[in-house]
Every structure is written in C-alpha cells, then in structure tokens.
Amino acid sequence: MAPQSTIIITGGTGSLGSSLARTLSTSYPGRFHLLLTCRDTSDIHAQAISSFLTYQNVSFALEKLDLADLEAVRAFTESVKARIEKGELKGLVGGGVVGSAACQTFYKGGRDVMYTVNCLAPVVLMRGLLGAMLEGGLFVNVGSAAHEIGRVDYFEGKEEGEVKEGEKLAFMEGMKRYGSCKLLAIMLGYAFQRRVFAAYPENKLHVVNLDPGSMNAGGRLLGTERHWVFPILYTILGTLGPVLRLVKKDAINPPSVPAKAIADLFGAPKESESGVWKTGKYFVLDDEKKSNALSLNEAKQDEVWKNVSRDLGLEEDLKV
C-alpha cells in the first residue's frame, strides 16, 4: 500500500537524520513517504542512505537543501506546499530539523551560521508549512542539554567583523554559542505552539524539542569543524558509555537510540502526546521533561519570537 503521509527530515544524511530514516522505514514500514534533505546529495553518506532505503523498497526522495541559505529554505517550503496541493505529496505529518551546525564557520549572508540553521531556518519551515499541518502535524527540533548555559541575547548586536571567518572560539565560548542557539530554538518552539493555539484553538499541530542525549557516531557528529576537545572527550565517554547508561540512559548512545525516540513520536504517539497543546513540549529521549526556567519564561519567549520575526522580515502574528 502506498504511504498516505509524508515526513520531512532535514539533515537527512547526517548521523541522526539517516538513523531516523532507517528507523521509520523498518519500525513503521509503508506508512510514510520520507523526504530527506541535505547539502550534498552525491556524497558517500547520501549514497549510503539512498541505497538502504531503495533496498528496503521505501518511498523516499533526497533533495538538496542548505539550511544556512534562507532563500533556499523559503523556496523549498513553497515547493513542498505546491506539491501537496497538486497531490504529489500525501498528508504532510511531520518535519524533523535534525541538522545542528555545531561548526566553526561564523557568518554567511551577514548572519551567524549556527543562529541561521538552528533558529531562523526552523521558523521559516514551521511558519511556511503551518497550513499543511494544522490537522495533525508534528514538528521535531533536536534540542540539547547545552541550552542550560545559553543566553537569550547571545546573537543580538553581533557584527560580522567581530569574528573572522575560520577563526576558532575557545571551548567554553563555543559551547555558549551552541547552547544559546539551542536555548533559542526551544523558546521559539514554545512561542510558536502558543501562537498556533491562540490563532487556531482546535488545531492538532504539535511542536517538540527532543534532546537526543550524548551520541557516539564515529566522529561524524558536530561536523568537520568541531573543537579538538570533542574527539578526545567522545573517545573517553564512548568507552565508559555502558557504565554511564546505568545511571543516565541518555549518556553516549548510538544515534539509533534517539532516532527510535523520534520515530515513535511519529509512529506510535502516547495518549498524553495527542489532543490540543497550548505550548510545546520538551523530551529527553522518550521521557517528557522540563527545559530550564529561562526557556519557560513566556515574556522571554515572546522577546525571542519578536527578534527572530524581525530578522526574517515577518510579522509576529501567524497567518496561514
């Protein structure tokens, strides 16, 4: 039977994105058409996931999309909507933004790349696809415990000349940068869900930020520009992983573990994950948790939403 619904996976050839595609195709065979996006559709990782999905006879497409290019994200969103209207894509039920861009590249198009990929691009996708997902869609953004050290104002007032292209930050400053974009992404998810509820009280759209925990993916995580500390850290923690997981189940898992947690949100949601949501939710793997107090501050959420809407040249109010 042909799938009747579509899930978009950005970063679809990365460690987590490709694991999510594999898990959806094997745990819920035939249920979903998978639309994977990546920056390079011809590299070895794209070839690997394409070969796997083809072998499994999965309905899928692999398309080029750079989340750091907002015009490309807008064009992709319009293309998806047009294909839905024509019946070329069936029932858009999900979007998973799984690219993290934890990189040392700072500016592209005048903006910080991490801010663009983790904050601006997801909002373009969520707002652009809102009309197609009001009746039962799910947006999943990949979160991180690093949001605990993030700042709401980290990217405000940053000038392109402050940091030279390719210049590397100190480890803790880099973590603050990464944590800040993850904090903002969580707050944007909450703010978006609240606004959807206010505008469409009967909607069944859900927004989730899911912390996959620490992952060991053979060096692919955090990209080629990761700080030198990470390979050493992940080698040590990877060895200790089985012991650490006895205490904390999200410690140093292979990507297949968080992929299963995300896939089950789409394929087998719990009763508590259905109905109308007034605000977004935060998960660590398959456990619903509370993100930090700052992220739950609605006045601060509104401030972040206002700033991102400004940066995108959009009105704050939602319109389908």
Image (cartoon, rainbow, N blue to C red):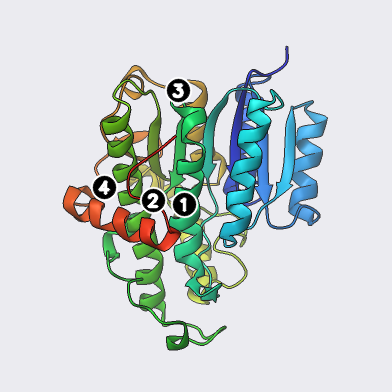
Label 4 crowding class (10 Å Cα cut-off): few <14, some 14-19, many 20+?
many
In the picture, measured across the screen, residue 294 lies left or right of residue 157, that is: left
Q: Is residue 231 above or below residue 57?
A: below
Task: Describe the element under mark 4 as helix, strand or loop.
Answer: loop
Q: Which mark is residue 244?
A: 2
Q: Secondary structure at mark 2?
A: helix
Q: Quadrant of residue 18?
A: top right
Residue for badge 4? 291
- Name the residue rendered at 40%, 43% in the picture: 210
Q: Position of residue 10 (x, y in %)?
A: 59, 47
Could you tell which of marks 1 and 2 lies nearer the N-terminus? 2
Inspect the image, locate mark 2, and give the three-letter code of the amino acid beneath it.
Leu
Which residue, given by chain and number where applicable, does mark 3 sit on?
A: 136
Helix, strand or loop under label 3: loop
- Residue 252 is labelled as 1
Q: Is residue 139 visible?
A: yes
Q: CA distance from mark 2 to mark 3?
A: 37 Å
x then y, percent, for residue 254: 55, 47
Q: Residue at x 44, y 21 (%)?
A: 135
Vertically, is 284 above or below 263? below
| Among numbered discs 4 and 1, the one appearing first in the sequence | 1
Using the rendered image of the protein, determine whether residue 280 is visible from the camera's viewpoint: no
Q: Amino acid at mark 3?
A: Gly
Measured as percent of width and height from the top left, residue 218 is found at 62, 58
